[in-house]
Amino acid sequence: MTIQTPVIAGNWKLNHGPEETRAFFRALLPEVPADHVGTIAIFPPSLSLAAAVEVIATRTDILAGVQDVYWESRGAFTGEISAPLAHEAGAQLALVGHSERRHVFGESIEETVKKVRAVLDAELSAILCVGETIEERESGAAQGVVTGQLEPVAGTLSQMELSRVLIAYEPVWAIGTGRTASPADAAEMHLHVREVLAKHFGSAASAIPILYGGSVKQENAPDLLAAPEVDGLLIGGASLEPSTFARICAIPS
Ligand code: PEP
């Protein structure tokens, strides 16, 4: 599997069961030519992963992933899913450290490190989500917070693994709120993320896709995608409706 930029990713959160998932792809596929530029990734609820994998089987340009994994592979962990089982079920990527995992479910930085390791060890690609709260931004701590979320993960990565690592900058104050970072704000933080990665990986850092997420809509997507250092988008609400999502996928890069 090769991931090409721009990456347009849809995080469905707790929306779309298996039937709705099939209906979504039946509507989306004719609207997205298979030779479009870039990679599309959809993160359905894990109960709908099999339906997604089945419907996109003939489309190598569209990948399915899971929204979270537990760091253990198997065992007495009721309710959890693991990276090896997600891989077996057809997932090619996993989100790690989404702000709802961090802020609604109290996931710690140490846990995101273990999860990224589990994802990469299972041969999946990881999208590590990072981002600051509004209080952190207003107090001038945004870059430090993002560095603190990135560094512990970066410290565990080998150069060989970099082709399976993506970062999503998602300011918490912009997720599901209708408030979007300006293209300039996004570019500034993406540049910072790139610099942190470059400290660890040198010139190889330039190939790590950095996506922006937070109230992306059809209207603001072109300017965000055109911002420097923005290699794609991670989209929640606006990824749920096939024609809206298809129009975002069709934005020229
Ligand atoms: C998300 O869930 O990652 C997200 C960015 O959501 P929304 O686009 O709805 O803000």
Image: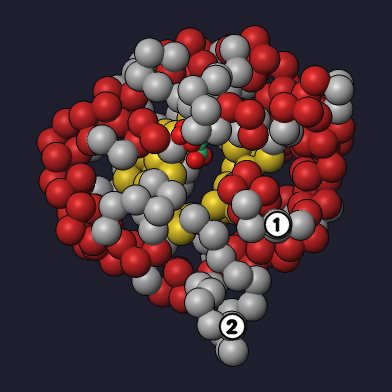
Q: Is residue 113 visible?
A: no
Judged left or right of residue 222, residue 148 is: right
Which badge, 2 or 1, is on the more N-terminal residue? 2
Q: Residue tagged by mark 1?
A: 106
Q: At x 39% / y 46%, what residue is drawn? A: 12
Q: Position of residue 61 (x, y in %)?
A: 32, 43
Residue 95 versus residue 232 in the image, above or below: below
State the SS at label 1: loop
Instruction: Residue 118: name its quadrant.
Output: bottom right
Q: At x 49% / y 18%, what residue is drawn? A: 225
Disc 2 or disc 1, which is closer to the eye?
1
114 or 39: which is nearer to us? 114
Instruction: Residue 182: name its quadrant.
Output: top right
Instruction: Compute the Cα span from label 2 to label 1.
Output: 17 Å
Q: What amino acid is at disc 1?
A: Gly
Q: Residue tagged by mark 2?
A: 77
Residue 106 versus residue 162 in the image, above or below: below
Judged left or right of residue 138, residue 43 is: left
Q: At x 65% / y 71%, what residue is drawn? A: 71
Q: At x 59% / y 48%, what residue is drawn? A: 100
Q: Position of residue 30 (x, y in %)?
A: 13, 36
Q: Locate the C terminus and report the quarter of the image it occupies.
A: top left
Q: Position of residue 237 (x, y in %)?
A: 39, 35
